[in-house]
Amino acid sequence: MKNDGHVLFSNLLYSCVDKKQRANETFVPEHVFGYIISGESHQKTIEGSRVFGPGTIALVRRNQLIKSEKVPGPEGEFKSVNIFFEQDFLRRYSAENKFAPAKRYTGDPIYLLPPDPFIKGYFNSLIPYLEHGWQSTASMAELKTREAIELLLRLDPTLYDFLFDFSEPYKIDLEAYMNQHYMYNVPTAQFAKLTGRSLASFKRDFEKIFQTSPGQWLQQKRLAEAYYLIREKGQKPSEVYLNVGFENLSHFSYTFKKMFGIVPSRV
């Protein structure tokens, strides 16, 4: 399946874009094993911003909020290959190999791999299939996914906990988490999961803390931040709306005027 410079075969994704492109999703639901062929990936979390260039090979842990942007390099393109390690597959793999339960992973959620000829060769073996539109079968995709796991565990056995920790997020401080992550545009159900709550308990706890609904609070918080960035930092509305969690400029302008009585461009 091909869509806007991306080719997806089962759980294998090949990206090739010739202009800057923000990721549509900011929530990472599954572990991602990725290789940047050319260009740069700019990633922003609450810990700060990081830039990953050509040749970077990394594991990105599931259940994260990340704003990312693909930036073409001097040759004019951004290219990457990603493999998604789905939880159902990892559970089955663990059971087949009779693995002991993993410990809760507490390391860096973005793990950069050291140079390794076997893993580099692995990604190089995938590229011709993905670049030339090879129609992957489910069995072939699974075979390549198994190979990736074997190579990762050979390179660094401590990645066992990264890959096979199946625990879900535990209940955390809701007020602190929301004040740090309000600018991520994800459904309320994802915020509930990331704070270790069911949707019902999330809404109940939220209204007890903030005295309003999650949707109302998020909109007001994002608009207040946008007003600050435009008025005090001199940023343009076209730069601000995505950064504070809105999906499109017209909706942002409408809600901004409704709250402040003036369109963003007139602030």
Image: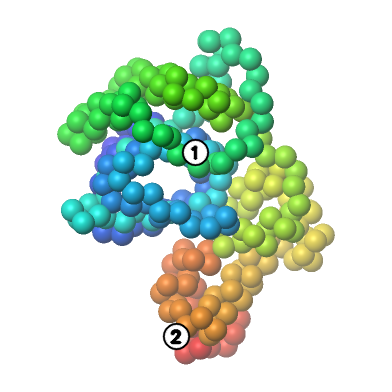
Mark 1 crowdedness (10 Å alpha carbons): few <14, some 14-19, many ≥20? some
Residue 215 seen anywhere in this rendered image of the structure? no
Judging depth in this view, the residue of 267 and 228 nearest the camera is 228
Judging depth in this view, the residue of 27 and 2 nearest the camera is 27
In the rendered image, residue 129, in percent from the top left (x then y), is placed at: 22, 29
Per the image, the residue denoted by label 1 is 111
Judging depth in this view, the residue of 77 and 267 nearest the camera is 77
Residue 238 seen anywhere in this rendered image of the structure? yes
Q: Which of marks 2 and 1 is nearer the N terminus?
A: 1
Q: Residue at x 19, y 31 (%)?
A: 128
Q: Do the residues labelled 2 and 1 touch (CB within 8 Å)?
A: no
Judging depth in this view, the residue of 246 and 178 nearest the camera is 178
Instruction: Tell me the kind of residue under disc 2.
Output: Ser
In the rendered image, residue 223, in percent from the top left (x then y), is placed at: 58, 74
- The figure's colour scheme reads rainbow
Please say if 9 is above or below 242.
Answer: above
Q: Which label number is shown at residue 102?
A: none
In the rendered image, residue 68, in percent from the top left (x then y), is placed at: 43, 54
Q: In this view, does 178 lie to the left or right of 145?
A: right
Instruction: Tell me the kind of residue under disc 1.
Output: Tyr
Q: Exactly how many numbered labels are in the figure?
A: 2
Q: Which label number is shown at residue 265?
A: 2
Real-space Cα separation, disc 2 to disc 1, in angstroms: 41 Å
Q: What element carries label 2?
A: helix
Q: Residue at x 61, y 58 (%)?
A: 181
In the rendered image, residue 126, in percent from the top left (x then y), is placed at: 26, 28
Q: What element carries label 1?
A: strand
Looking at this rendering, what residue extends furthest in the front direction? 115
Q: Which residue is drawn at 48% across and 70% down?
A: 241
